Image (cartoon, helix red, strand yellow):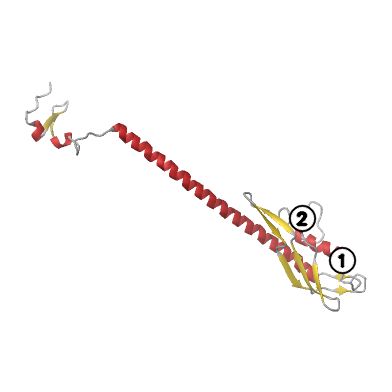
Amino acid sequence: MWPQHHSNASAFGQLAFNFRGNCRYRPAEQDHVVGGALPMPGRQRRLDIADRGNAMIEFALSAMVLTYSLTAVFQLGYSMYIYNELVGAVRAGARYASLAKISNAGDKALPAAYNTAVKNMVVYGNTNPANGDQAVVPSLTLAKVNDVVITWDAGNVPTDVTVSISSYAIDAVFSTFTLTGKPSYKVPFFGQYCSSGAAC
């Protein structure tokens, strides 16, 4: 049997007995909530669900911004990498063109063998590539390299050579960037020139 509560328990608190018969004091103030309202478990659950929903929306928006940012960084980095590779290939071709021998009949004609050798140097890094050799830059072909442009002086002697890319599309997965007429590299001609019509 539980002991009878004192009639003034509501004013002074009440004694609560556990099953062992021990007595503990519980202030009456703990029986009430500020404002006279008891907690509402159902409302609390709804608030928790609403908080979780807000967190999901915030995560989705943040993930979208982060995805676009990472995509832009990847595109910029990959495009710069491919462009630098093209610059290196064009420089290698221009370097070879400036030191190679040119032979013609003194008519400013561009020897086909010379032009092909320069293009091979740009694309394959070798003037005489073997079958199956890979291009130094992905998807770069001989057709994407302009013919060598030679600058002649008044005496029909070559002074400068220019090597450039005609058109190249950089495939950055999410978008494509097309380069037209670049990169381009111009260097002085230091090679041997023969205008007698015979090979040097």
Q: Mark 1 highlights which residue?
A: 111
Numbered disc 2: secondary structure: loop
Q: Split into 4 quadrants, where in the image is the C terminus?
A: bottom right
The disc placed on residue 56 is: none
Numbered disc 1: secondary structure: loop
The quarter of the picture where residue 135 lies is bottom right
Q: Split into 4 quadrants, where in the image is the N terminus?
A: top left
CA gap, disc 2 to disc 1? 20 Å
Relative image position of residue 164 (x, y in whole percent): 74, 64
The quarter of the picture where residue 95 lies is bottom right
Q: Mark 2 highlights which residue?
A: 141
Query: Residue at image x 6%, y 31%?
Result: 8
Relative image position of residue 173 (x, y in whole percent): 63, 49
Residue type at numbered disc 1: Pro
Relative image position of residue 136 (x, y in whole percent): 72, 57
Residue type at numbered disc 2: Thr
Relative image position of residue 74 (x, y in whole percent): 58, 53
Q: Is residue 88 above or below residue 171?
A: below
Of marks 2 and 1, which one's residue comes earlier in the chain?
Answer: 1
Residue 27 seen in this snapshot: no
Q: Residues within 10 Å of mark 1 (few under 14, many from 20)?
A: few
Query: Residue at image x 35%, y 37%?
Result: 48
Q: Is residue 106 above or below residue 129?
A: below
Asked whether the beta carbons under mark 2 and mark 1 sit within 8 Å of each other, the answer is: no
Query: Residue at image x 6%, y 28%?
Result: 7
Residue 139 seen in this snapshot: yes
Q: Horizontal placement of 20 versus 190: left or right?
A: left
Farthest residue in the left direction? 7
Q: Is residue 183 above or below residue 52?
A: below
Q: Horizontal placement of 191 versus 10: left or right?
A: right
**Count of numbered badges drawn on the protein:** 2
The quarter of the picture where residue 73 lies is bottom right
